[in-house]
Image: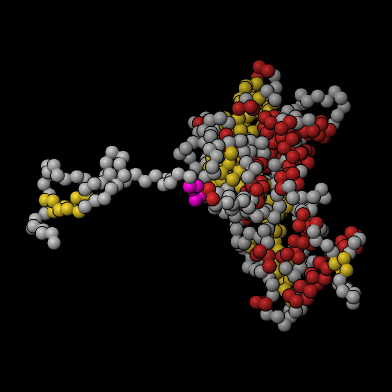
Amino acid sequence: MMEVAAGPWTEVFEGSERNGESLGSSTLTLAPLVADSPSIRRSQPIFINSNRSKGVESFSSSVPSIPNPFPELSKSPVLISSLPPQTSDKHLIKVYGEDSHSRSVWVSRGATAREVCHMLVQTAHCTDEENWALLEVHPVLGLERCLEDHEVVLEVQATWSLKGDTRFVFCKNYAKYEFFRKPMLFFPECMISDSADVSKGMTSSELIQNLLKSGACPEIQGFLHVKEASRKAWKKVYFFLRRSGLYCSTKGSSKEPRHLQYVADLDDLNVYAVVNGRKLYGAPADFTFCIKPSKNPVRTQDLKILCAENEQTRTCWTSAFRLFKYGKQLQCNYQLSKSAPRSLEGSKLPDGKSKSEASLVAMDFSGKAGGRVIQNPTEAQSAEREEGQAWRRREALRCSLPNLNSGARPSSIHKSQPWFHGGVSRKEAQRLMEKQGLVDGMFLIRESQQHAQCFVLELCYKLKARHYLVIACEDSGRKYFTMDDGLTLFIDLLQLVEFHQINKGILPVCLKHPCVCVAL
């Protein structure tokens, strides 16, 4: 039995490890707490080897490696993940959708805007892969521009100010290459410079088409309102846009060399559309755009703010800036965008169908002997059309029966469609269409703010948004929708859209491009 005296005591381990020796047997004794007592020995940390015995393999090496379930993503220049990748050349960027929600994206140092858009299309489960774009948006300054497909995203981000709120926005843009398809709409004859070579007897239309095919652009001229530096006043000046740069005339519309003043070099600038230019900069019209140096952070004093008389004039100037700066590269981007859904996805067949669609076969169950496979393609297409028409007739009969109450009718089927935008205002709808490109046939449907139980069809035609009221009416106790005072009736908005995608009706052009908002 060990005796213990009263007073403060401490436990001391004797024989503990010192100088790298292993821990031997230890005995427990009690000693008084004396500050400078030489008999006190403090315990030392024990070093534990990772391999306790030689020749024994670690546990991790005995576990078989797990195969990569997504090998097709390992070759992609873009990675989307919550954790950084193993390689050190990946950088994190944040991309916003039009619903203000964002997604973090790991991109390689050389990832282009086209590659980032392709990965976002797959991640957001978009229904199509065409006409998507990445916008560079400066909310405070009201500036935005569509990145060209070949631009490196990280190089663009490197020009931003660290304290700013600049962001990337992922959205549709149908007008990115529209001037290749309809050049005369984007380059009116009145804006083509008289210095163009017409000695070969070519018309303006032929001249523009030949220039665009070669990746060039005709010289542009015309009046623009320009905001004077450090002043709120605007001045109307005659400008010339040539391959050598942007010039303005100091004497009316004179093109004499002594009256031309050099304004900017096209290789060192970017052109931006200005949102809400009247409020932010006191612009005389809503068709404002600006140019700024491409390598410097955005500063108000570096902006050259210009204002056109109409949307066609603004579009002509901004398109010409792009063509003069990038030239043949835009033509290559356009050709690549037409084949992008096949070459990017890799799962498309030469006829444009996916592998999953190619594995489906048409069947005929009309006979008594059971189903048969329809081998004839013409017969298969005919059966598909008949089935679609039969489905529409069944739906029309079901939803138009007079004994059904309004709650049982499928009147809310339009709410699940990508072209329906609920109760957005007229200004918000027009702003959304401008962001996605004012091309003929782009449309959306929204609820009318002035007429109860009615809707508004917003349609773009010749760079302008047009508005058509969709009125709800009843006939023999059945509810319909009409746009022509009851001459043509539709059981729901879905049928109205499907009809006008094939027939113009009272519209100037068929519905073609739905104005959609994607959530990331």
Question: Which residue is the extreme one toward the top?
Answer: 258
| Residue 288 image point, x, y percent | 61, 39
| Residue ID at (85%, 23%) | 199
Q: Count of labels shown?
A: 0
> Toward the viewer: 445 or 332?
332
Confirm whether residue 308 shows in the render: no
| Residue 298 image point, x, y percent | 52, 34
Confirm whether residue 29 shows in the render: yes
Question: Which residue is the extreme one toward the left?
Answer: 6
Q: Where 321 falls versus 118 (above or below)?
A: above
What secondary structure characterizes most of the magenta part? loop
| Residue ID at (14%, 44%) | 39
Residue 412 located left or right of residue 137: right
Magenta run includes residue 274: no
Residue 210 located left or right of residue 157: right
| Residue ID at (72%, 65%) | 493
Q: Quadrant of the N terminus?
A: bottom left
Residue 199 located left or right of residue 101: right
Segment tinted magenta in the rendering: 56-60
> Toward the viewer: 418 or 7?
7
Q: Which colour style is shown?
A: secondary structure
| Residue 112 image point, x, y percent | 63, 38
| Residue 67 image point, x, y percent | 62, 51
- The quadrant holding residue 94 is top right
| Residue ID at (86%, 24%) | 200
Q: Where 1 falls versus 73 (above or below)?
A: below
Question: Which residue is the extreme one toward the bottom?
Answer: 403
- The quadrant holding residue 387 is bottom right
